[in-house]
Image: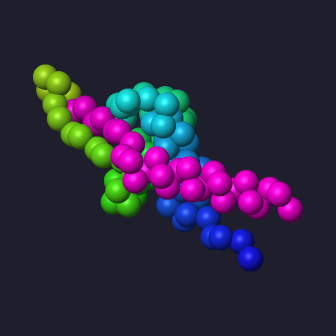
Amino acid sequence: MFKPLDPILHSELRLAVMSLLLGLEEADFVYIKEQTGATAGNLSVQIDKLSNAGYIEVEKKFEGKRPCTTCRITQKGVEAFDNYVETLKEYVKF
């Protein structure tokens, strides 16, 4: 019997965000939006889901009058991503 895939990570956009953040110390919302090709609204919803799961930390601040949202992957997020990849490998073996 296969181990179930993490439903938080089993979304194309959330997986893309996690993959980006895994290789970076942090990334701002605009960069993530550009790299994923997501709409601002959809990306915002998916970032909230990752944040609520504890997989990323989100810092919101202002630079002058412009809002700036920065995301960082957490240790819990790294572990969840690693587990997701290992589970996928089990699926691919068959």
89 with respect to 21 (left or right): right
Q: Residue furthest bottom?
A: 1
Span shown in magenta: 67-94
Q: Horizontal and vertical percent for residue 45?
A: 40, 54
Q: Is residue 27 left or right of residue 81?
A: left
**77 inside magenta stretch:** yes
Residue at the location (53% across, 50% down)? 81
* Residue found farthest to the left: 64
Q: Position of residue 46 (x, y in %)?
A: 43, 52
Instruction: Give above or below for 2 relative to 64.
Output: below
Quarter holding the C terminus is bottom right
Q: Residue furthest top?
A: 64
Classify residue 11 by image quadrant: bottom right
Q: Position of residue 49 (x, y in %)?
A: 40, 58
- The colour scheme used here is rainbow
Q: At 21% from the left edge and 33% from the top edge, which residue is drawn?
A: 67
Q: Nearer the viewer, residue 4 or 13?
A: 4
61 horizontally vs 3: left or right: left
Position of the N terminus by quadrant = bottom right
